[in-house]
Image: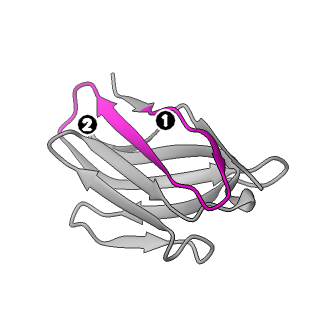
Amino acid sequence: QVQLLESEGGLVQAGGSLRLSCAASGNFFSINYMDWYRQAPGKQRELVAAITSGGSTGYADSVKGRFTISRDNAKKTVYLQMNSLKPEDTAVYYCKMGISTMSIHDYWGQGTQVTVSS
């Protein structure tokens, strides 16, 4: 059974930094894409950052230049380095991975709260 385990988020002041991680465990062949999403209260879940198996990355306009996604394939882990945090970054952050077992399925982490105070 595949599981994704996210690190704890936290409370940070505006301008601060935080790094999230998400590690996959279980029996599977490979991890394809790895994404980070977030959902603020009263808003839809949105894609924040994505990284392909080849290492290509993409970011939402709202986080470009501030957030960096990376992956460690040996550790089956994806990271999200968040710098220059703003109050509007406050949300529950979720990782998602496209993982190959007999076929490719999406798996989600449990979500972690990030709160940025002004």
Residue identifier under label 1 = 109
Q: Nearer the viewer, residue 100 or 69?
A: 69
Q: Is residue 69 above or below residue 27?
A: below
Mark whose residue sits in front, 1 or 2: 1
Q: What percent of the width, then of the height, locates residue 60?
A: 56, 72
* Amino acid found under the numbered disc labelled 2: Thr
* Amino acid found under the numbered disc labelled 1: Gly
Q: What percent of the width, then of the height, locates residue 27?
A: 22, 26
Here the colouring is one colour
Q: What percent of the width, then of the height, locates residue 11?
A: 65, 40
Q: Residue 10 falls in which quadrant of the image?
A: top right
Question: Residue, x 39% and y 46% (percent of image)?
Answer: 97
Q: Is residue 93 magenta?
A: no
Q: Name the outermost residue toward the right.
A: 42
Question: Residue, x 74% and y 60% (percent of image)?
Answer: 88
Q: Residue 69 falls in which quadrant of the image?
A: bottom left
Q: Nearer the viewer, residue 69 or 37?
A: 69
Question: Residue, x 63% and y 46% (percent of image)?
Answer: 12
Which quadrant is home to the C terminus? bottom right
Q: Is residue 25 magenta?
A: yes
Q: What percent of the width, then of the height, locates residue 18?
A: 50, 49
Q: Helix, strand, or loop for circle 1?
A: loop
Q: Which residues are magenta?
A: 6-29
Question: Pointer 1 and pointer 2: residues touching (CB < 8 Å)?
Answer: no
Residue identifier under label 2 = 101
